[in-house]
Amino acid sequence: MNKEAAITLKELEIGYTHNRKNLPIMGALNATLYKGELVALIGKNGAGKSTLMRTLSAFQSPLGGTITYPDGKNHQRKASELSTILAVVLTDNSSINNMSVREVVALGRTPYNNFLGYNRKRDEEIIDKAIERMGISSLAQRNISTLSDGERQKTMIAKALAQETPIILLDEPTAFLDFKSRIQLFRELKKLASETNKAILVSTHDLELILQIADRIWLIHDNKMFDGSINELSKDGVLTNFIDSEGIHYNTVSNRIEIV
């Protein structure tokens, strides 16, 4: 079965511009994010994961190459113009306060509202469905400031679902969650990707968990990005080269990280 591409990177160069001078972090990135898959973006701190996520979201421009989205258009547009193409869930959502869970989720309908900002019946149904999907119906009237980290993260993902985009990008969604909550969230994201045919890209340091759950991996290592299934990157030795160090070993047979 042919998979449908959601995002395609061709010779993409990412980095920053300062005083009209390009400061590249990494270049020649070639990868494809497919619909129906949960893809993990992994790499060491400072490798360029956050820069890549911001570039995919059009919060900053690439220095070269192209990003092609499901509508066939490239990256040459504002972030607001991508609001019906991709939804972004950031680690820190502290700017959202004094709102109920339902009001926060309703923000996902903003790209579709009329000029008065009113939600129509269909919008309300989509909001309710997103809340139910994430299992937070009992929290709908709670103030978001009263939620646990896990409940807050589910709320933000529900907001992304209400946005009804084919792509969801999540930056370190498990950063403040306990072990059980991290497992539950990753499993729910994989289920979401499969059942709703969304392309979900998650940046994470939770290697032990994500290697057991993700459909594919985007690995940034030694100023290169490797795109493949876990089996492919394991057989090629890419994961071993990335993970193995003094006292740490990647077992390619069991797909486990061992302390030796």
Image (cartoon, rainbow, N blue to C red):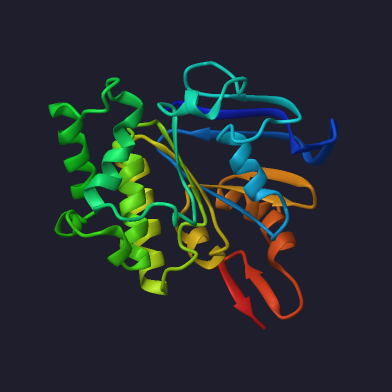
Q: Is residue 11 left or right of residue 128?
A: right
Q: Position of residue 225 (x, y in %)?
A: 70, 44
Please state, as top left, top right, bottom left or bottom right, where the N terminus lies in the image.
top left
Residue at the (30%, 58%) spot, across then down: 144
Q: Residue at x 31, y 24 (%)?
A: 112
- Please state which of residues 145 and 185 is positioned toward the viewer in this rendering: 145
Say which quarter of the image contains residue 115. Answer: top left
Residue 64 visible in the current orientation: yes
The x and y percentages for residue 198 are: 38, 36
Residue 89 lies, in percent from the top left, at: 45, 47
In screen coordinates, is 240 left or right of 89? right
Q: Is residue 242 left or right of residue 229?
A: right
Evaluate whether residue 3 shows in this view: no
- Height in image: 50 above or below 182? above
User: Which of these two is toward me, 161 or 213?
Assistant: 161
Height in image: 185 above or below 215? below
Which residue is at a point 35% across and 55% down the rendered structure image? Answer: 97
Rendered residue at 44%/41% (across/down) = 37
